[in-house]
Image (cartoon, grey):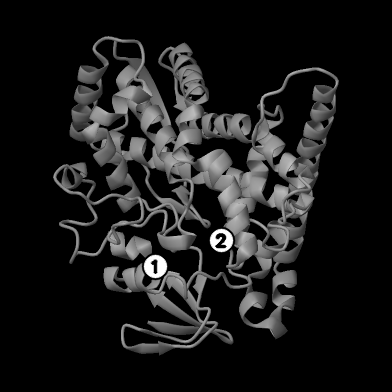
Amino acid sequence: MLIHLGSVPVVVVSSVEGARAVLKTHDLIFSNRPKLSIPAKLTYGAKDIGFAPYGEYWRQVKSITVVHLLSRKRVRSFRSIRERETISMIDMIGKTRGSVVDLSEMIISLTNNIICQVALGRIYGDYKKFKELLVAFQNLLGVMSVGSYIPWLSWVDWLRGLEGRTNKVAKELNEFFDGVIEEHINKNKMVNDGNEKENDLVDILLDIQRDDTTDFKFERDTIKAVISDVFSGGTDTTFSSIEWALSELIRHPKTMEKLQLEVTKIAQGRPMITEDDMVNMHYLKAVLKETLRLHTPLPILVPHESRQDVNLMGYDIPQGTQVMINVSAIARDPLLWDEPDKFKPERFLNSSIDYKGFDFELLPFGAGRRGCPGIEFTAAINELVLANIVYKYDLALPNDGRPEELDISEIVGIVVHKKSPLLVVPTSRF
């Protein structure tokens, strides 16, 4: 359908055919991003991967980030970090000795720790403040700015406090990222004095910035914008998927039992499920696919924008039209899915449908040129963490609550989260 948000024409796509036409048939034409005032302020003038306009700058930044952080080879190289942090979380759960555990807090801490180590080289101490900043950052990305669509009403954003909140979060994140970069510059100076170092993403970006042989130059703002992308995308969607998967498993005890049977059989008494085991975890993968279908992290993908006039499914779409793809509606379309509002991982056991961007029935990470490049990174964490939690522990609700009583109401930002944290009482299975 076509709607007008102020002076901006917006096409909303809610079908498989429409999504395929935008993200595959006319992918290049719809590969641009619209200029949105709030994301621009938070990403240093859209110098990141997610919101940068289509062009050579975006291609270079994406290529460098994928090669050095998000490629399959690089994701595999971070295996020891993922397994170490997962073991640490499992041990923390065990030390609670049957008391109430805030599993949401533990999972977001784990994902943050993993991303800190692979991107920044170490875990940063003031986690609580950084978490609050990330939450505020994500919430602002999901807020509709009146000024982006009706420029002469931009003062409304100021009146409702949106401008002030955005400037505050941008300033605090900028100070944090500046501190990280300065720390890495000082570390590099020490390396020149004969010490050894192990390169993380910031080191690599700084090396590229110093390289005089390349035509493409990284400004400091580009480095900070890429870091913000890695953290906001890597932490939020990963944490959300694991939290929703565990919530649905608790609400569906028979599904939990089937998954526990699978992981227990594959583990063969070993203390931990490893990443080598994942190839045989068919029901685990089905649970995660069904979670991403029923609880799509970004219900509406980041808007696309047409770079030229185009005929889309018989309709003439002018250059500059925004396109919003309602992937949540597609994922719950009764013409595509049997009992679409029910949690049924079995639907994927004999199905080739995956979430990698080639099957337009399931697009939690988008598809085409502007699809999320971090799918491998996210999937590796999701599978390992979920498998080990359900392998090691039974999870009950506090105060002998019944599974169907678990609150699954949502809070909406750019990523959809559970409104209330996942509180459980874990008991060891062995």
**Outermost residue, front side:** 213
Give the vertical position of 289 relative to 118 (above or below). Answer: below
Residue 337 appears left or right of 143: left
Residue 96 is situated, as x and y percent measured from the top left of the image, at 47, 15
Q: Which residue is mark 2?
A: 142
Determine crowd level at label 2: few under 14, some 14-19, many 20+ residues with C-alpha closer than 10 A.
some
Q: Residue at x 27, y 30 (%)?
A: 279
What residue is shown at x 77% (from left), y 53% (from top)? 219
Residues 225 and 393: in front is: 225
The relative height of residue 144 versus residue 317 in the rendered view (above or below) is above
* Residue 166 place in picture, x, y as percent: 72, 59
Quadrant hosting residue 271: top left
Mark 1 burial class by Cα count in 10 Å: few <14, some 14-19, many 20+:
many
Q: Given the image, on which type of amino acid does mark 1 rest?
A: Leu
> Helix, strand or loop at disc 1?
helix
Q: Nearer the viewer, residue 18 or 185?
A: 185
Q: Picture coordinates of residue 211 (x, y %)? A: 76, 44
> At which x and y percent is residue 130?
68, 38
In the rendered image of this protein, does residue 270 appear above or below residue 128? above
For marks 1 and 2, give the CA distance: 22 Å
Q: Is residue 104 visible?
A: no
- Examine the rendering and report whether any part of residue 370 can be seen: yes
Residue beneath label 1, please?
A: 23
